[in-house]
Amino acid sequence: MWVKGLRSNGSAPDAAVVIGIEYRADKIRRARDLVDGLHAVIADAGMLPLRDFAVPLTTCIEVLEHLTDPEPAVAELARVTHGGCIVSVPWEPWFRLGNFARGKNLGRLGNDPSIFSSSRGAVSTRS
């Protein structure tokens, strides 16, 4: 989960504070190696260590589908963001078909075991 955009070369925009939030220490170390000036934090997506409305732009790219219960993470994104929030999840069935076509997870018909399916639909945190 990132809370500010990056340039295509991986550097932070001028005067931007880039915070990366991840729960795995190995991924935090890798992100610090790749992104100059990154403020990397080990934290849970459902309990972000940020003040209310502290962030002008958040991105949550291909995270929610890995959570057994994404609602706390979505609520936290709404809580900490005062500008825009970009969320991306795989588009089924195309994600699964793409996996299958490239020979990934063939025994599961392309279904990635780390992705949780949900029939609950969209989650709204603001009225």
Image (cartoon, rainbow, N blue to C red):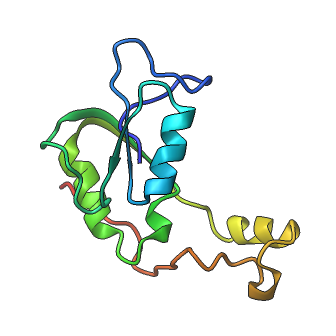
**Is residue 126 or residue 29 the one in the foreground?**
29
Indicate whether 80 appears above or below 57. below
38 or 77, which lies in front? Answer: 38
Q: Is residue 50 left or right of residue 19?
A: left
Front one among 110 and 11:
11
Residue at 77% of width from left, 83% of height from top?
Answer: 109
Identity of the residue drawn at 42% across and 71% down: 67
Residue 45: x percent and y percent? 32, 59
The answer to whether residue 102 of the structure is visible from this angle is yes
9 relative position to 86: left or right: right
Residue at figure coordinates x 51%, y 41% from the top left:
31
On screen, residue 38 above or below 111: above
Image vertical order of residue 7 relative to residue 120, above or below: above
| x and y percentages locating residue 48 in the rendered image | 24, 53
* Res 124 visible: no
Q: State which quadrant residue 25 falls in.
A: bottom left
Q: Residue furthest left?
A: 52
Farthest residue to the top: give it. 14
Q: Is residue 116 left or right of residue 14?
A: right
For the C terminus, the image quarter is: bottom left
Q: Is residue 69 above or below residue 40?
A: below
Q: Measuring 33% from the left and 66% from the top, which residue is drawn there?
A: 123
Place of residue 105 in the rendered image (x, y in percent of width and height, measured from the top left):
77, 78
**Residue 53 x, y percent position in the rendering:** 16, 39
